[in-house]
Amino acid sequence: MKIFISVVFLLLLPLATNAYNINKCSSEECVENFKDIKKYARKDIPQATETLATFYYKGYGVEQSFKRARKYYLKSAKYGNPSAQFKLSLMLLEGKGGDKEISQGINWMEWAARNNILAAHYFLGLYYIEGKYVDKDIELGKQFLKYAATKDYRKAQYILGKLYESDVFGKPNSEIAIEYYKVSAYYYEPSNKRLIAMGINLPQTSEKGEIERIEVESDSLDDYLDNLLSALRYMPAPGKPTGSNLVGMGCRSQDSNCGFIVDPEEIERFMRDMQLQFFDPILTKHMKPLDSF
């Protein structure tokens, strides 16, 4: 019997909640920040183009427009920006800002995975196991999830635990499941709660099995934008995208000065923004827990 947990539930439990957030804003400061970023986006600098897309997506300093967000994520993705590739893939699969484009959405998700976006490996794993958007392939799905898990993507470790408890991979194997829960429990509370439900308390937990987690204060949005604008002033614009860029090769094969820093927390926030995608019953029909957490 399958023992999945709702993907929606997973997305509502972020790995970090104290990082800066870009929210809807129409203040004079937000409008000025939007204009500053747009100036660099016009030079086709991928990092600026992705940020501009996020501003449109959120309605930060400008009227909210999913259509424009999708347009600028696409521009940034064509230059090889991994997080833009991932965000674009979700918008294409969901149909936000335009028609649903399943083939292109999966294509960009695969490029994001090649560029080491662990969330892309995680979602591709779920898609192949469920047969959502792609032909069902449990073994391939397991490979995607295991890759993310080996890179300490906690949600992948947790869902692998649930899968090994079930019959999805064959005969249930609680020993392997417990190992996945243990490596993620200190970082991801659902794993710890699953261990408690199985009668296992980890060291350094309270009598109730609770784990005290230390939260590290992150930079404010203002600090982030100041640092980004400072970097953009000295960042060369890459060459115009050509054939290889259209399938995701990106500027790294065109310009040695092109590089990207991917913020996993920012990816998590975008996933939560896109969570309506995961109410689709095709993906969630087997993902309801059999026990309470």
Image: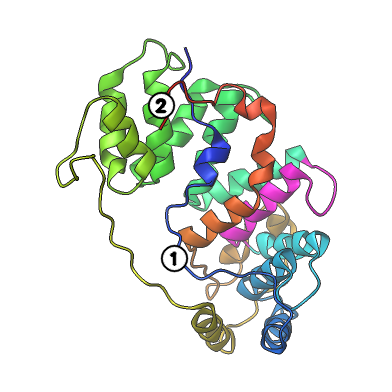
- Between 267 and 79, the one lying in front of the other is 267
Residue placed furthest toward the right: 99
Residue at figure coordinates x 73%, y 81% from the top left: 38
**Visible residue check, residue 242:** no
Residue at position x 72%, y 63% from top? 57
Horizontal relation, residue 57 to residue 227: left or right: right
- Residue 275 position within the rendered picture, expressed as x and y whole percent measured from the top left: 63, 46
Whether residue 292 is situated above or below residue 48 in the rendered picture: above
Q: Which mark is residue 162?
A: 2
* Image x and y of residue 172, in percent: 36, 14
In terms of image quadrants, where is residue 150? top left
Q: Which mark is residue 104?
A: none
Residue nearer the viewer, 226 or 89: 226
Q: Secondary structure at mark 2?
A: helix
Residue type at numbered disc 2: Lys
Q: How many marks?
A: 2
- The reply to whether residue 100 is visible in this rendering is yes
| Kind of residue at badge 1 | Asn
Which of pointers 2 and 1 indicates the residue nearer the eye? 1
Which of the two labelled residues, at mark 2 and mark 1, occupies the earlier sequence position? 1
Give the residue displayed 51% in from the left and 71% down from the top.
20
Image check: 61 left or right of 120?
right
- Residue 175: quarter of image: top left
Q: Which residue is mark 1?
A: 18
Does the magenta-highlighted stretch encompass residue 179? no
**261, 10: nearer the viewer:** 10
Looking at the rendering, the stretch of residues picked out in magenta corresponds to 80-101
Residue ID at (23%, 39%): 208
Label 2: few (<14), some (14–19) or many (≥20) C-alpha neighbours in 10 Å = many
